[in-house]
Image (cartoon, rainbow, N blue to C red):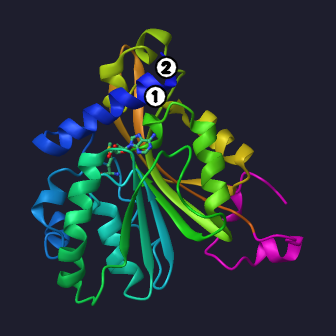
Amino acid sequence: MPTDAITQKVSERYAKAANTGEQMCCPTSYDMGHLKTFIPEEVLKISYGCGTPAGLKTVRAGETVLDIGSGGGIDCFEASRLVGPTGRVIGIDMTDTMLEIARKNASVVAANLGYSNSNVEFRKGLADAMPVEDGTIDLIISNCVINLAPDKRKVFREMYRVAKPGGRFTISDIVSDQTVPQYLVHDTQKWGDCLSGALTLTTYMTGMTEAGFLGIHLVKFSPWRVIDGIHFFSVTLTGYKLPPATTASSVRTPPFEAPSADLWMNEV
Ligand SMILES: C[S@@+](CC[C@H](N)C(=O)[O-])C[C@H]1O[C@@H](n2cnc3c(N)ncnc32)[C@H](O)[C@@H]1O
């Protein structure tokens, strides 16, 4: 299937889902009771993620956070609360209907959080060509989106480009235990269901490493569905873009919370 056709079908699918609020993808473990205190129901009912990348103590006050495929804005709004009024959040999505709902609710969330101005901005764009300046992002999050992109390697390269040196990512996504066969890859319905575009975990992590990220490790892993003997999982991964001219000693005492040594994929 041509990549433009995949992108168009996926966008149509999520434009429809934004209007109907239909159940899609797998349940996340966000505490909706907590989110309801400051995020409108219109956003919460179109939460289509497969993890909680903004809710894992990864977001820090004052940071600039980028959410790839922000949808109705659920992760952006939780990140907005966590970065505080001095921080900044940018959500990118390709689907106009999602962007409209997210933008409409940004001022409501800001008022609920007691901010004088919203610190969240939603931009229209593709994950593999993001309208974001080079080296400006402290933390990249994404919730069940990269599997929907036809060219994941381009997305990983874009992530590396926009991350600050010393920046990091925490992303939730769907992966499979084996290469998805061609008959599923050509099934447009299952692309939109976050199945056909899934990579294996190994391919996913290799793609991230090839893009330049280091210290890539699994934070969460939960089984989701089995289709024709193929197991699909929801995973959350974290990794780092090291600062330039890093020395071996500075790698051992990085300016971020490093994973335990045995989880590092690359020795530098
Ligand atoms: C499964 S929904 C997840 C939305 C949101 N992250 C959440 O947790 O509710 C996928 C979202 O990613 C967007 N999307 C899918 N592929 C994209 C791409 N290649 N570039 C930008 N946005 C994309 C869709 O428009 C949709 O809003």
Residue ID for mark 1: 197
Residue 238 visible to the viewer? yes
- Which is closer to the viewer, label 2 or label 1? 1
Report the residue at 37% width, 26% height from top: 191
Label 2: state its secondary structure. Answer: loop
Q: Between 139 and 57, which is closer to the camera in this rendering?
A: 139
Residue 246 image offset from top left, x and y in percent: 85, 71
Label 1: state its secondary structure. Answer: loop
Residue 28 visible to the viewer? no
Residue 183 image offset from top left, x and y in percent: 43, 9
Chief secondary structure of the magenta span? loop
Report the residue at 38% width, 85% height from top: 84
Asked whether disc 2 touches disc 1, contact meaning CB atoms under 8 Å apart, the reply is yes
Q: Between 94 and 227, which is closer to the camera in this rendering?
A: 94
Quarter of the image with the C terminus in it: bottom right
Residue 180 numbered mark, or none: 2
Q: Between 71 and 126, which is closer to the camera in this rendering?
A: 126
Q: Which residues are magenta?
A: 243-268
Report the residue at 48% width, 45% height from top: 126
Q: Quadrant of residue 210?
A: top right
Mark 2 sits near ligand 1, with its Cβ under 8 Å away = no
Q: Amino acid at mark 2?
A: Val
Query: Does residue 232 show up magenta in the picture?
Result: no
Q: Amino acid at mark 1?
A: Gly
Residue 72 image offset from top left, x and y in percent: 25, 55
Left or right for 138, reference 26: right
